[in-house]
Image (cartoon, helix red, strand yellow):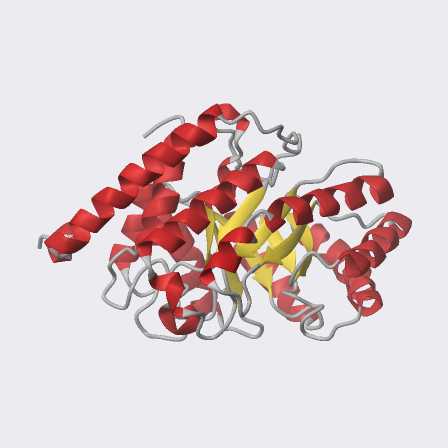
């Protein structure tokens, strides 16, 4: 049975708008390629399965999220969405493996990533349920070789010294189960340098060092559209500060990732996020600044889980791609060395 093409479901007016946006994208990418702004080098350490694309850009810069599902119509239940992400070439999917989930739910999440043809970045959602974390890493085995330990512990009220204590206790156990996996922390809700300093100082002392550092970036909470676009460059400043702190404490470079990013974390976010012109411009500029300051991996939030009542998703509830999908797809086409 033939699946209907998504293009046949999109009105001609939408196609016209899409064409204009893609022309704007092409112009933007030409400017980016010719830009003389000084770049910071990317980390020399690659994550498992990561490739280096054109102009030295790491492939995992173009990831997305599979967060908790708030609608039955989501990335895990809709093969058409998985096919679209595979066609676009998204190489990394960050997935929330809910604490205490049964093996069927684990299997559904990892198969979703495999169907997309992407690599797995798993979120160990509870840093306190050690037996389940051990089961998760053992169950997934070589199918998932990257894990974040917890999610936004600073936002969840977990003190830095408590997080550090759990990290020092649990990560050696998980590395014993899968010595090929990389473990990433502290997955902060923003570039919380005080929290990060405690974590880095403590891991340098314990020698249970992270394989990479991650934080989240949502610059436009309760901001106007104009103010939001002026704040896109903050991703560069925050990344520079994080990378400098890592090197000053550990004495060496580590990959730094932004494992959730979008314009506003509100639920729902402001309406301007649904306009094609804004979200395309925001997305292009965000990726540009990430490249310039050497972000090693990044995951747009999110693919299709009805996040922010669907306003943060790259696909609508009918499975149609939205403009942020097309924006990232076009940048992937610019840098991926093959089709």
Residue visible at 62% across and 36% down in the picture: 294
Marker count (numbered): 0
Residue visible at 33% across and 43% down in the picture: 88
- 120 or 6, which is in the foreground? 6
Q: Work out which quarter of the rendered image holds the N terminus and state it.
A: bottom left
Q: Position of residue 194 (x, y in %)?
A: 81, 59
Residue visible at 68% across and 74% down in the picture: 156
- 139 or 144, which is in the foreground? 144
Q: Position of residue 105 (x, y in %)?
A: 44, 69
Residue 247 makes an appearance in the image:
yes
Residue farthest along the front direction in this orientation: 226
Residue 69 makes an appearance in the image:
no
Q: Position of residue 107 (x, y in %)?
A: 43, 62
Residue farthest along the right direction in this orientation: 205
Residue 321 vs residue 110: left or right?
Answer: left
Residue farthest along the left direction in this orientation: 1
Q: Is residue 12 above or below residue 310?
A: above
Q: Is residue 55 above or below residue 297?
A: above
Q: Position of residue 72 (x, y in %)?
A: 32, 74
Q: Which quadrant holds residue 22? A: top left
Q: Work out which quarter of the rendered image holds the C terminus and state it.
A: top left
Residue 183 vs residue 219: left or right?
Answer: right
Residue 275 vs residue 223: left or right?
Answer: left
């Amino acid at each position: 049975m033939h699946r209907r093409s998504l293009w046949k479901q999109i009105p001609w007016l939408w196609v016209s708008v899409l064409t204009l946006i893609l022309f704007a994208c092409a112009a933007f990418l030409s400017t980016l390629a010719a830009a003389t702004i000084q770049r910071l080098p990317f980390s020399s350490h690659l994550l498992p399965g990561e490739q280096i694309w054109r102009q030295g850009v790491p492939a995992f810069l173009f990831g997305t999220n599979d967060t908790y599902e708030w609608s039955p119509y989501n990335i895990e239940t809709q093969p058409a969405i998985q096919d679209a992400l595979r066609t676009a070439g998204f190489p990394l999917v960050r997935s929330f493996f809910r604490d205490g989930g049964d093996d069927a739910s684990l299997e559904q999440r990892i198969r979703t990533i495999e169907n997309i043809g992407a690599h797995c970045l798993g979120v160990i959602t509870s840093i306190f349920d050690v037996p389940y974390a051990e089961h998760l890493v053992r169950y997934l085995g070589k199918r998932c070789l990257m894990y974040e330990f917890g999610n936004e512990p600073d936002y969840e009220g977990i003190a830095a010294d408590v997080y550090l204590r759990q990290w020092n206790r649990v990560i050696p156990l998980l590395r014993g189960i899968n010595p090929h996996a990389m473990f990433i922390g502290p997955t902060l809700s923003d570039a919380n340098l005080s929290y990060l300093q405690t974590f880095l100082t403590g891991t340098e002392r314990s020698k249970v060092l992270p394989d990479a550092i991650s934080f989240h970036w949502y610059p436009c909470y309760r901001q106007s559209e104009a103010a939001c676009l002026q704040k896109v460059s903050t991703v560069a400043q925050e990344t520079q500060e994080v990378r400098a702190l890592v090197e000053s404490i550990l004495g060496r470079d580590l990959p730094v990732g932004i494992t959730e990013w979008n314009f506003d974390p509100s639920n729902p976010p402001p309406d301007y996020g649904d306009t094609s012109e804004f979200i395309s411009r925001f997305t292009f500029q965000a990726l540009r600044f990430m490249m310039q300051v050497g972000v090693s991996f990044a995951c747009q939030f999110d693919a299709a889980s009805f996040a922010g009542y669907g306003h943060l998703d790259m696909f609508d509830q009918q499975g149609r791609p939205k403009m942020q999908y097309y924006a990232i797809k076009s940048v992937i086409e610019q840098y991926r060395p093959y089709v």
